């Protein structure tokens, strides 16, 4: 055999081998290492607790703290924080890879339980406004204690609070925000601000020791005066109201937060006055991709169950079943590819983040539903965990802006503002 033939054969063998490598091959080495660590943790620690947490009363927190403490041992609550705050990531990673480094993390968690993925993921959502306001001194003062608490084995959570009884997904859309009935207000006083109002459906709200809260400074200006504040759970006048009894994602509580003349010192202002809307949109445009990742992780788990069920029942060689599974696989891979594209840039493209979020969550809902249809009467049984995935995935179509609101965001950004990347 000629040298040229040997070289050509070696190259072809290399290409063929690379085709079979895992989907995270393009990520940085440290991200792949973290992903493998998370995958093993899910298998050893999270999976055995999922059914117990799902079946527990909605306001039970001991099991949730137990899983958080287990996650703290491998830094699940701080691994995405920059090194300047004590975490393992960096601002350079964010600029270079966007939220792409976060996707393996949420995919692996949600393939086990979208609720557990939200329990951990909502914590990072609460952190984002502090990180994105670019005030390093504020970040060190508020976020370093989070890292220290995790290392001490006593993790602390951060929550993100924008939704109110009279303002939900509409405050995640410019036109809706203009008309929203905002009820949480802050008044400037000597040395700080006095905050009054209520927030609703706040993920991890009843467990958080720190909450990034958005409030108006001027009732007349509404959303244009939105400002972000860091509220600690020990502040006088802060309390937790109702904890919702949800259909799915029961591992992550959704709580009502009440603010009655809460004094917030000037040093707890996050960013600048009246910059809340910009900070909110940057945060949500960044986080919508990972929310899509939660949906895709659940879809991956459901798809695996569908294939295994077809094999178990001897249906895998049936052409109609193969066509059904192939269509599900095609939708899954298409949504996932779009998701990776949208997450791979910072600052994020608003319309692309919105498309990725509603495409991933709608696809996941469809795959879970079709898996249940394939399984027939067995699909609704608790022992077939697609039943829980189906309940859990529904919420990904609702939070971070309903999918209808995300479609309006696309219309606004892509059609009206003409921010078109391709056309």
Image (tube, rainbow, N blue to C red):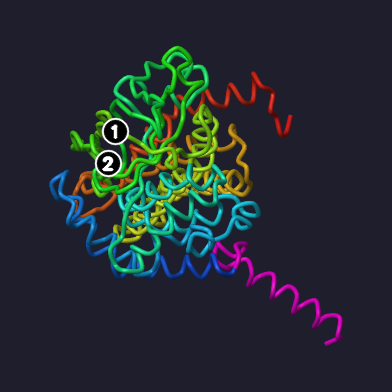
Q: From the image, tell me which residue sits under label 2.
A: 235
- Rendered residue at 37%/64% (across/down): 148
**In terms of sequence position, does the residue under pointer 1 or pointer 2 come before the other?**
2
Within the magenta stretch, is there residue 280? no
Q: Is residue 6 above or below residue 225?
A: below
Decide which of 221, 397 is in the foreground and name it.
221
Q: Is residue 414 above or below residue 63?
A: above
Prevailing secondary structure of the magenta residues: helix
What range of the chain is rendered magenta? 1-28
Visible residue check, residue 337: yes
Q: Quadrant of the C terminus?
A: top right
Q: Position of residue 106 (x, y in %)?
A: 43, 54
Within the magenta stretch, is there residue 20? yes
CA gap between label 1 and label 2 equals: 7 Å
Q: Position of residue 153 (x, y in %)?
A: 29, 67
113 to the left or right of 14: left
Please identify the residue farthest to the front as the structure is shown. 190
Q: Position of residue 84 (x, y in %)?
A: 54, 61
- Rendered residue at 44%/42% (across/down): 267
104 to the left or right of 389: right
Q: Is residue 181 above or below residue 133?
A: above
Decide which of 130, 78 is in the foreground and name it.
130
136 to the left or right of 76: right
Q: From the image, tell me which residue sits under label 1.
A: 262
Q: Quadrant of the N terminus?
A: bottom right
- Rendered residue at 59%/69% (across/down): 29
Disc 2 is placed on an element classified as: loop
Mark 2 neighbour density, 10 Å: few (under 14) some (14–19) many (20 or more): few
Decide which of 308, 136 is in the foreground and name it.
136
Mark 1 neighbour density, 10 Å: few (under 14) some (14–19) many (20 or more): some
Disc 1 is placed on an element classified as: strand
Do labels 1 and 2 touch, CB within 8 Å? yes
């Amino acid at each position: 055999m000629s040298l040229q033939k040997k070289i050509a054969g070696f190259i072809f063998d290399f290409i063929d081998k690379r085709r079979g490598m895992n989907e995270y091959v393009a990520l940085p080495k440290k991200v792949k290492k973290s992903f493998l660590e998370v995958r093993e943790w899910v298998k050893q620690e999270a999976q055995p607790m999922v059914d117990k947490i799902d079946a527990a009363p909605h306001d039970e927190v001991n099991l949730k703290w137990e899983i958080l403490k287990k996650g703290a041992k491998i830094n699940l609550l701080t691994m995405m924080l920059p090194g300047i705050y004590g975490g393992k990531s960096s601002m350079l990673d964010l600029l270079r890879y966007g939220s792409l480094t976060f996707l393996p993390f949420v995919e692996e968690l949600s393939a086990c339980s979208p609720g557990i993925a939200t329990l951990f993921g909502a914590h990072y959502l609460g952190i984002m406004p502090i990180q994105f306001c670019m005030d390093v001194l504020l970040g060190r003062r508020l976020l370093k204690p989070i890292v220290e608490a995790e290392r001490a084995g006593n993790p602390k959570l951060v929550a993100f609070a924008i939704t109110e009884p009279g303002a939900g997904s509409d405050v995640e859309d410019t036109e809706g925000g203009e008309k929203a009935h905002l009820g949480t207000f802050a008044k400037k006083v000597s040395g700080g601000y006095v905050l009054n109002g209520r927030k609703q459906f706040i993920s991890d709200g009843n467990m958080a020791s720190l909450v990034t809260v958005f409030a108006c400074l001027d009732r007349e200006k509404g959303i244009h005066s939105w400002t972000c504040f860091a509220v600690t759970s020990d502040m006088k006048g802060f309390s937790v109201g109702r904890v919702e009894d949800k259909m799915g994602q029961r591992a992550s509580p959704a709580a009502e937060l009440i603010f009655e003349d809460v004094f917030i010192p000037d040093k707890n202002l996050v960013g600048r006055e009246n910059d809340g809307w910009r900070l909110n949109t940057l945060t949500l445009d960044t986080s919508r991709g990972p929310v899509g990742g939660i949906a895709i992780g659940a879809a991956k788990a459901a798809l695996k169950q569908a294939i295994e069920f077809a094999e178990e029942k001897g249906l895998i060689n049936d052409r109609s079943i193969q066509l059904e599974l192939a269509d599900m696989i095609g939708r899954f891979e298409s949504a996932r590819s779009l998701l990776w594209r949208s997450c791979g840039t910072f600052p994020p493209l608003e319309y692309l983040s919105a498309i990725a979020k509603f495409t991933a969550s709608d696809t996941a809902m469809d795959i879970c539903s079709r898996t249940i249809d394939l399984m027939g009467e067995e699909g609704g049984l608790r022992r077939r965990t697609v039943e829980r995935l189906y309940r859990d995935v529904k919420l990904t179509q609702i939070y971070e802006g309903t999918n209808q609101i995300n479609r309006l965001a696309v219309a606004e950004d892509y059609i009206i503002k003409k921010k078109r990347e391709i056309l």
